[in-house]
Every structure is written in structure tokens, then in C-alpha cells.
Image (cartoon, rainbow, N blue to C red):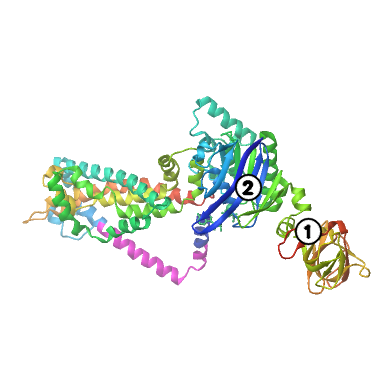
């Protein structure tokens, strides 16, 4: 069963098209994450679903019913904003209760729902406090509670964690994931943090310049990126892309090396390999070799920037005893970990 | 602690470190300025406690202090009327300004509509026209509508002000749209979003506007003088002028009336100033 369906969704601001024909089916209970670089139209898409922005063309349906022309409050959605949008002049209880403002419920029922939401979020003891006396994470919880009490069919989140510090962000991320498991609600979540996207999503939607680049599970978009943009956007540090020319099962790189690939395609290509798939090896006999320019120790591993003579790649060395800057290393990899993209279109070649 | 107050503290500390000749000069200047501000008030109080023979002795402590003037002013029925009239006019005008200026300011700040900029500039341009130029048309209009000598007649020109609209617009522009959109999703209508969400967020501006409008109307002189001719309809400033007639100016009475009329302005200021200070603290809050 589908909860949310977007069909050929388009949004123009004046003459600029910021959302360019988005199509997406979101299943009931699914956690969808929209991710992409700044300005790619994530928020605009979310705001169209919420009814805060008019749709230029295309349709949005919730539960099979087209809602393009419905008021936000009639859409059965709730939204959590980046800067929380909780009101400084109201207590936590009143802020959460704002979500029930127009719902005709008995006073006792409202109180019950507010307290239930607060309890789930661990905010029960703060109900009478003003936001000024709350931490950032607690404020964001209030905003989530305000969305929860509405009992919406679809939750919309627009970068809800980006105002929090890194540690709190990790913690809230886990809590949102638990909350989703508990409420089994449909969630559309916008972020430009790809780690957040990977950890939270059932399916990730990667956007660029108003278009969807790929939709898939975190594993799919990571291991089988549809194009070079997705390949470099997902994963940190980004996938190494080396220009070359393919012919007869070989790719001749611009650096001069030749690498066997499992495809018969020909022409200019980009050869992709993730830093963690590229490991230092004995310099002789390796298909790739170069000089280490920078070594970044991360603890469990060491990121090695290796100059291949014209192109630089990042490889992963061991946490202890990694080659030092200046050393010449060979780089080994599993041929199955190679990705190949058309140099002109960026599309993956399989 | 908020960013604003932190900045203040830091500035304070820095100032103390550089204490020296510069600081002494600054304090001297401030002291002179303060003296210049306080002197008229002090003379007002002193004169109100003097008998007429002593008025032109510029001593601050009366030789024969008396409360006779106060007795006379406070027992004068007319003074009671004037005080009441001023209070009523200033209060109603203040409430009206808070409501309408904020409503129009909000609309200009937060809604996109055709000619919005034109409307805004038109409102602003009325600031360039001095009251003196307007009183004659106002008078003619009041005469034709039969508003002379009425509270409505005194109040109508000031029920909304371009300045207030401008001030409120500027403040509403600083309210993040998220606050309003969250309320929209929760199902509040546009009026309630303004009233329940936007208005509480600009309380400091409302308090400032309240002080300006109340004081402005409490001390307004020209228009009330022109529009009223029945002594019971006078406002305080107009009424006080009846103490100066052609042959003699009863300075001690004028000063006593002025001293009494200063009281409400002090109260209004003290009450609303608290809001302003609280508001500044709140403004530093993220979300
Ligand atoms: N009201 C508006 N008028 C004109 N252009 C707008 C408006 N809102 C957004 N845009 C433009 O639309 C584009 C997409 O904006 P959007 O907010 O959807 O980006 P985003 O993907 O959410 O980016 P970010 O990660 O920075 O939040 C941007 O180029 C932005 O400048
Ligand atoms: Mg955004």
C-alpha cells in the first residue's frame, strides 16, 4: 500500500525551475530520506508535500487522494523544522499542545496525548518549562512531540538535527530511528548529511539540481551507485574517480596504468574505487603505484593521499604502521570493487 | 547566557580595562548631560512647592515650602477632567496603535501581494508631512462630521501611525517564517497565526511602541487645543495653559500641574520597560 505518491512534480520560482519532475512512491511506514547538495530542491519538495509551497505541475497524493489543493492542516501531515519552530513564550506543554490546536478533542484527551508524547520523548518532567530553559536536543524533542500528537499519516522532517552539535546529533539520530520503529509512521526526512541519510533511511532519494539521481536502499546506493554523482556524494571520503579509456576489457588510465575490468564497453570512462577498497601493497607488481603525500590517522585506519603521477587518490592504510608521507606505495584492490562510469554522461556502466 | 548579554558583559570588561583619562572625560560628559536633563525636572518640582513671590528666585530649595499649589490643583474639578481626558485618549490611542500598526506591519512584512512595496512606500511617505500642515484639513473634516469637542475628534488622527506601521514591519521581518508555517500546518488561520504566534514574538517592539504612542498622546498639544473648546474636553497640556492668561502666568500652578502629569508617564515607562528588557533576553534564544 502506498501512502505518499509524487508524480512529475515541478516547481518554478519565477523563471528558475528548482524541482524538475520528481516521481516517487513511498510505502506506508517507510522511512524515506531526501539527500543532496545545498540548493538541490529538497526543502522545496518537502514544502510542497506539506502544502507550504504551491505546486507548479504534477500531483501529490496521500493514501491515493490527490492533495495538491488542500490546506496544510487538511493533509494529515506534520512537519518538524530545522530551527524547531517552538514558541519561546509558551511552556513545553503548550508547545506540544499547539499540534492539537484545531482538533476537536476533550480537554482530558488532549492532556493525555500531550503527556503520552512527552513520556515517549523523555520530556515528561519538563512539561511546565519554557524553551529558554531547555537544551537544543530537548527543544528538538518538543518540536517532534508537537508533530507526534497530531497522529499524522506522514511525518516531514527538514534537517531537524543540523542545529545540534555532533554528539547530540548522533544521539538524536538513534532516537528518531527508535521512534520510527515504535510509531511505524511514514517519514520523509530531508538532510544534506549523507551519514544521517545512510543510518536512518529505508530508502534514500539522492537529488541534484531538482532531479532524482537514484532511489534505493542505503546498501544499493552505496554499492551500486547509478552514476558518478551518487558515487561521490554517498560515502566519506568520496569515491576516487580516475579518468581513462576503456577498450576490450581494459581501462587505460590517464596516469598510464592499465586495469582489467569486467566489461566490454569502449570509449572515455571514469574508473571508480572507494578509499576503503584501496589498500597499500608492495610497490612492485601493483597496477597502481605512487607517492604518499599526506597521511591522516583516524585511529582504526589511516587515510593515505597518494599521488599517482597526475591524479591523486585516497587509500586506506592500517591504523598502526601505515606508510609515511614520502613513501612510495603500490595500491591493491579487489577487481569486484571497481565501478565504471561513462565519462560523458556519468551513468554507471555495468 | 544569551549572545547579546555576553557581548554587553564583554564590552563592559573591556571598558574597565581601558579606564583612565578617556573614561574620566566620558563620565564628565555624561554627568553634564544628565545634569542638563534633570535640571528642568528639578526646577519643576521646586517651583511647584513655592509661593508665587518666590518663583523667580532660582533657588532649588524653597524658603517657604508649601503644598498649597498641589491642594489647589488637585481640588480643581477641571484638573480632574483634564487628567481623565488625557488618560482616556492616550490609552485608547495606544491600544488602537498596538493593534492596527502591528496588523498592517505584519501584513507588509509577511505576505507577498501585488503593490506591497508601493503600499509600504505610500505609508512611509506620510511621515514627511508635518502635523501643522494637517490640522486644518483635520479641523474642516471634524467640523463636517460633527466631531469637534469629542474624544473621537481628539483621537482619530492618531489611531494608526505610519511610524508604528514601519516599526512593527521591521520587527515582524525578523520573525522566522518557520514559526508561522509551523502554526499554519497545525491549522491556525492567518489571523490567529498573527495574534497567537507572531504578536508574542515581537513583545519588545510592542512595548516600545506603547511607550512612544502613550507619551506622544499624553503630551500632544496642538491638535487637542484646536479640536476642543469646551474646558471639560481639554487634555492636560491644553488645560495647563489656562493657568497662563494674558496679564499673568501662574508659573507655580503650571509647574504643579506638570509635576502631577509626569506621574502617569513614569508609570507607563516603568511598566513597559520591563517588557523591553525581558524581550531582549528572549531574542537571544535560538528557536
Ligand atoms: N521562495 C523562493 N524564491 C525563489 N527561489 C527560491 C525560493 N525558495 C527556494 N528557492 C531556490 O530554490 C532552490 C532550492 O531550494 P531548497 O530550499 O529546496 O534547497 P535545499 O535542497 O533544501 O537546500 P539546503 O540543503 O541548502 O536546505 C535554491 O536555489 C533556492 O535558492
Ligand atoms: Mg533545505
Q: Position of residue B141 (x, y in %)?
A: 15, 49
| Residue assigned mark 1 | A349
Which is more toward the observer, A160 or B234? Answer: A160
Query: Does residue A124 show up magenta in the picture?
Result: no
Residues packed near mark 1 inside 10 Å, few (<14), some (14 to 19) or many (20 plus) = some
Vertical side of A256 occupied by B261: above or below? above
Range of residues picked out in magenta:
B13-40
Q: Nearer the viewer, residue B23 or B282?
A: B282
Residue holding disc 2:
A23
Q: Say above or below: A295 vs A219.
A: below
Residue B124 is tagged as none
- Residue A58, percent from left and from top: 56, 47
* Ligand 1 contact, mark 1 (Cβ < 8 Å): no
Asked which secondary structure carries label 2, the reply is strand
Where is B193 relative to B26, above or below?
A: above
Q: Judge left or right: residue B212 versus residue B14.
A: left
Direction from residue A270 to residue A191 in the image, left or right? left
Q: Which quadrant: the C terminus of chain A?
A: bottom right
Residue A297 found in image quarter:
bottom right
Name the subunit of mark 2: A
Up the image or down, A101 lies above or below B221; here it is: above
Query: Residue A103 location, x and y as percent?
Result: 50, 31
Could you give the CA–CA distance between mark 2 and mark 1, rounded to whole angstroms?
A: 24 Å
Residue lying at 25% horizontally and 50% vertically, measured from the top left:
B158
Which one is in front, B65 or B264?
Answer: B264
Amino acid at each position: 500500500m502506498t501512502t505518499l505518491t509524487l508524480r512529475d512534480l515541478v516547481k518554478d520560482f519565477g523563471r528558475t525551475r528548482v524541482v524538475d519532475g520528481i516521481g516517487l512512491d513511498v510505502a506506508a511506514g517507510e522511512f524515506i530520506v531526501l539527500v543532496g547538495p545545498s540548493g538541490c530542491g529538497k526543502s522545496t519538495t518537502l514544502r510542497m508535500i506539506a502544502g507550504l509551497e504551491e505546486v507548479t505541475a504534477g500531483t501529490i497524493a496521500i493514501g491515493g487522494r490527490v492533495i495538491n489543493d488542500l490546506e496544510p492542516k487538511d493533509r494529515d501531515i506534520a512537519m518538524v523544522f530545522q530551527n524547531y519552530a517552538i514558541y519561546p513564550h509558551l511552556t513545553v506543554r503548550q508547545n506540544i499542545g499547539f499540534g492539537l490546536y484545531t482538533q476537536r478533542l476533550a480537554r482530558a484527551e488532549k492532556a493525555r496525548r500531550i503527556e503520552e508524547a512527552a513520556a515517549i520523548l523523555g520530556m515528561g518532567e519538563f512539561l511546565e518549562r519554557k524553551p529558554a530553559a531547555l537544551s537544543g536536543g530537548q527543544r528538538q524533542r518538543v518540536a517532534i512531540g508537537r508533530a507526534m500528537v497530531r497522529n499524522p499519516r506522514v511525518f516531514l522532517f527538514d534537517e531537524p538535527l543540523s542545529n545540534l552539535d555532533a554528539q547530540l546529533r548522533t544521539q538524536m539520530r538513534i532516537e528518531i530511528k527508535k521512534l520510527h520503529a515504535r510509531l511505524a509512521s511514514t517519514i520523509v526526512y530531508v538532510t544534506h548529511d549523507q551519514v544521517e541519510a545512510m543510518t536512518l533511511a529505508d530508502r534514500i532519494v539522492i537529488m541534484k539540481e531538482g532531479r532524482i539521481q537514484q532511489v534505493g536502499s542505503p546498501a544499493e546506493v552505496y554499492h551500486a551507485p547509478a552514476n558518478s554523482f551518487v558515487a561521490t556524494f554517498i560515502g566519506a571520503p568520496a569515491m576516487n574517480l580516475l579518468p581513462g579509456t576503456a577498450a576490450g576489457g581494459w581501462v587505460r588510465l590517464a596516469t598510464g596504468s592499465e586495469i582489467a575490468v569486467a566489461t566490454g564497453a569502449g570509449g572515455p570512462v571514469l574508473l571508480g574505487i572507494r578509499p576503503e577498497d584501496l589498500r597499500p601493497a608492495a610497490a612492485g607488481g601493483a597496477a597502481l603505484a605512487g607517492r604518499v603525500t599526506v597521511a591522516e590517522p583516524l585511529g582504526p585506519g589511516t587515510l593515505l593521499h597518494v599521488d599517482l603521477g597526475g591524479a591523486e587518490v585516497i587509500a586506506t592504510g592500517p591504523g598502526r604502521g601505515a606508510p609515511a608521507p614520502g613513501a612510495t606505495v603500490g595500491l591493491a584492490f579487489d577487481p569486484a570493487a571497481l565501478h565504471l562510469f561513462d565519462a560523458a554522461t556519468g551513468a554507471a556502466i555495468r | 547566557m544569551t549572545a547579546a548579554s555576553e557581548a554587553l558583559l564583554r564590552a563592559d570588561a573591556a571598558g574597565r580595562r581601558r579606564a583612565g583619562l578617556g573614561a574620566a572625560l566620558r563620565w564628565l560628559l555624561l554627568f553634564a548631560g544628565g545634569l542638563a536633563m534633570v535640571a528642568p525636572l528639578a526646577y519643576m518640582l521646586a517651583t511647584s512647592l513655592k509661593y508665587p513671590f518666590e518663583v523667580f528666585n532660582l533657588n532649588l530649595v524653597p524658603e517657604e515650602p508649601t503644598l498649597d499649589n498641589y491642594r489647589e490643583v488637585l481640588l480643581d474639578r477641571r484638573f480632574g477632567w483634564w487628567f481623565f481626558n488625557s488618560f482616556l485618549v492616550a490609552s485608547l490611542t495606544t491600544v488602537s496603535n498596538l493593534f492596527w500598526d502591528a496588523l498592517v506591519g505584519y501584513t507588509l512584512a509577511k505576505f507577498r501581494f501585488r503593490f506591497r512595496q508601493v503600499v509600504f512606500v505610500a505609508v512611509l511617505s506620510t511621515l514627511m508631512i508635518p502635523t501643522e500642515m494637517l490640522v486644518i484639513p483635520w479641523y474642516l473634516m471634524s467640523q463636517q462630521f460633527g466631531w469637534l469637542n469629542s474624544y473621537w475628534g481628539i483621537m482619530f488622527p492618531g489611531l494608526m501611525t505610519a511610524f508604528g506601521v514601519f516599526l512593527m514591519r521591521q520587527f515582524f521581518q525578523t520573525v522566522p517564517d518557520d514559526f508561522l508555517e509551523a502554526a499554519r500546518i497545525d491549522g491556525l488561520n492567518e489571523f490567529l497565526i498573527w495574534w497567537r504566534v507572531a504578536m508574542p514574538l515581537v513583545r519588545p517592539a510592542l512595548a516600545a511602541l506603547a511607550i512612544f504612542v502613550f507619551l506622544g498622546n499624553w503630551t500632544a498639544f496642538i491638535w487637542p487645543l484646536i479640536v476642543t473648546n469646551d474646558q471639560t474636553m481639554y487634555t492636560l497640556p491644553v488645560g495647563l495653559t489656562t493657568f497662563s492668561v494674558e496679564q499673568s502666568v501662574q508659573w507655580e500652578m503650571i509647574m504643579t500641574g506638570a509635576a502631577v502629569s509626569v506621574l502617569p508617564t513614569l508609570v507607563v515607562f516603568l511598566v513597559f520597560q520591563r517588557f523591553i528588557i525581558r524581550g531582549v533576553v528572549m531574542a537571544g534564544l535560538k528557536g
